[in-house]
Amino acid sequence: MADVKTQDFFAASAVSIQDPILRQALIKVGTGFDGARLAAIEDVTPNRWDEWREEARRIKIHTLDHLDYYLDLLERNVAKAGGQVHFAADAAQANAIVAGIARSGGVKIVTKGKSMVSEELSLNPVLESIGVEVFETDLGEYIIQLAGETPSHLVAPALHKTKEQVAQLFSDKLGLPLLESIEDMAKAAREILREKFLQAEMGISGANFLVAETGTLVIITNEGNGRMCTSAPRIHVGITGMEKVIPSLQDLAVFLRLLPRSATGQRITSYVSMVTGPRRETDEDGPEEFHLVIVDNGRSKMLADPELREALYCIRCGACLNICPVYKKVGGHAYGWVYPGPIGAVVSPLLVGLKQAKDLPHASSLCGACREVCPVKINIPRMLLHLRNELAESPDPKTNAATPAARLMARGYAWLMSSPALLSLSHRLARSLQRPLLMLPFSPLTKGAGGIGRVRLPFLSRWTRAKDLPLLPPRTFHEIWQQELSQTARRRDT
Amino acid sequence: MTQVTVTRASLFATCIVDQMFPQVGVSTVRVLRHLGVEVDFPPDQTCCGQPLYNSGFNQQARRLATRVLDSFDGSEYVVVPSGSCAAMMKVFYLDLFQDQPDQLRRAERMAPKVYEFSQFLVQVLGAAQGEDRLGASYSGTATYHPSCHLLREMNVREEPSELLSRVSGLTMNGLPQAETCCGFGGTFTIKYPHISEGMLADKVENVSASGAETLVSCDMGCLMHIEGALRRRGVDVQTRHLAQILDPTKPEPGS
């Protein structure tokens, strides 16, 4: 599996939020991707968009409710078309299967289309360890492969890099002169990769969808590299998560409407490639072997949990990242694993272990924008709340991450709030202390324009480091009600 | 149109209004009474439990939620001057009690009676229709920040603006990126102050860019958060809860 750094979210996000280059890139996520998404939806007949989302969600619910049936159907139809399905329980097994195919095929060079699952599995180092050269062919993936980095966005993996940084990278790693335009860089990459496509014995692709009734692997791309990977080399290996299966080609239609619009605001991507088995006798080209590796790697655990199953409906469009105010501040790498943003904050804890990723479910203001844009209406905030509850109250010490202090605070808060009398008393005490405290020469409170400027006390200092805190009022609403607003008070007055 | 039947509503003031901003509660009561509502205030109420629920401490949250169910058992309507607390009571209680059938039934009974303040005014009292009954005036320019839970959990989108459009003397300015979270998120702002501050900085910039003198919202959590940064940065924009703008009796109450 890919390196897990989810436990460093707090520190990593504190660094990344200060990065001026990342900030510029992330502004473009909002204006570029999300703006395009909105425009594309406006283009759709009113109400249709929501009907599509409902339909897509229904298809996902149905398929995952009968996943064993559809995986079996898929396997039989892939076999019927002359391909072979491999099921992998975890990353090690999946990598071993692909390495095995490469070894028995005498593979020296692999070209790869974009695949988040292969990032999840850390497939490339495994292939490299058996002497296979791996070339990422999606431009963004190619860039981060050269840089030795991981993707920072589901759809745009090299989003965090400026074109100047890419030009420098191409110059350092490929010995090219410093190129100025993005077109020139794309052209340079294309020339290098074109040659690799022709040399490669094996092409690896991900899959956006797997169609059970026909045994078809579907990828949608804009660069055409995916089609090259699936058609030019002698062996094609598709690798993806088991949740990607859908029943029929008819079901595919609605997803082809939803995914590009949600991801990049396109009505349709430049390429929609559907691959069914290896080349047939009548075909002029295409691979001789077709393998489909279907990966579990923690997904059946998600499937078994009715509270979290929804996360498997995700079609990896990235719309929730593009709208998320937290993602747009900290970027993808801060999340510490392959899947960033709101959906990553749900998926990563489930795949790498909740305790290991305990900060991620809290890395959300629960504003709900992700749920609003999701093309399959995944209720991400609800799942984040569920994970927070697991972390706080699970009887399993492997999941429970609540510190004694946090538990004590929760209990104390509930205790205080369970007694209006106690609450009133504490308000009286605090409000009588606040003014003298503000006047003391060495006070834990300092005066600010809006009341309290800074508090040198745990927790409250985290508020007052950037914003003033209002002073407590001279009376609570309870007191005002009793004294002035209640029926008895009003009768007394008249 | 004269209303024949008297509407009775119970006020859930919310703990933040009770403890920090009682004048918002006073204005809420005044507006409701001005519109002919008979308002009561169950004295046992404190907090809806949302801070605990958002932190994952559902057991403790249920303790507080049960108190709310007890307090408002006999209420005809429950009016809440907060989209977030209203969402807790109307939406999240159903999740919170999903494994406790008895309490769930009570939560389900209460849910349809819970209204956020602006929602109650527009949907129940019809205060945005026909002849003006609000009698509200406020001189100056204002802009409106839609709070996240009000928008996306309560689905209250137009109601506050419909009410604000009836306030005489008030000019409303648009707020750029209005629907983006201010970064408060309850415990979020304490857990991740650096991220929260980044989001808040954007909100403050957009509020400044609106050119408005007053920022209006329906949630004191967001307003306290944004106001804190406005004061710290010396930005000359006032913050007001919608109820304070609609309050027909202007002098600052409750102090």
Image (cartoon, rainbow, N blue to C red):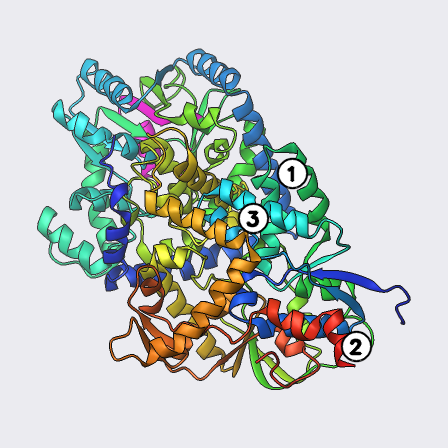
Q: Which residue is mark 1?
A: B103
| Residue drawn at 37 percent across, 19 percent down | A279
Chain of residue at mark 3 = B
The residue tagged with tag 1: helix, strand or loop? helix
Q: Quadrant of residue B99?
A: top right
Type of amino acid under label 1: Gln
Q: Is residue A107 left or right of residue B208?
A: left
Q: Is residue B143 left or right of residue A332?
A: right
Q: Range of the magenta residues?
A: A219-242
* Mark in the foreground, 1 or 2: 1
Q: Disc 1 to disc 2, how far (Cα)?
A: 39 Å
- Estimate the x, y position of residue A122 in percent, counting from the top left: 24, 31
Quadrant housing the N terminus of chain A: top left
Residue A112 forms part of the magenta stretch:
no
Q: Is residue B3 left or right of residue A418?
A: right
Q: Which residue is mark 2?
A: B133
Lower position in the chain sequence, tag 1 or tag 3: 3
Residue A239 forms part of the magenta stretch:
yes
- Estimate the x, y position of residue A314 in percent, counting from the top left: 46, 37
Find residue B64 and name its label: 3
Asked if badge 1 and badge 2 are on a common chain, one would say yes
The residue tagged with tag 2: helix, strand or loop? loop
> Is A250 drawn above or below residue A493 in the view shown?
above
| Residue drawn at 60 percent across, 83 percent down | B252
Q: Is residue B79 left or right of residue B198?
A: right
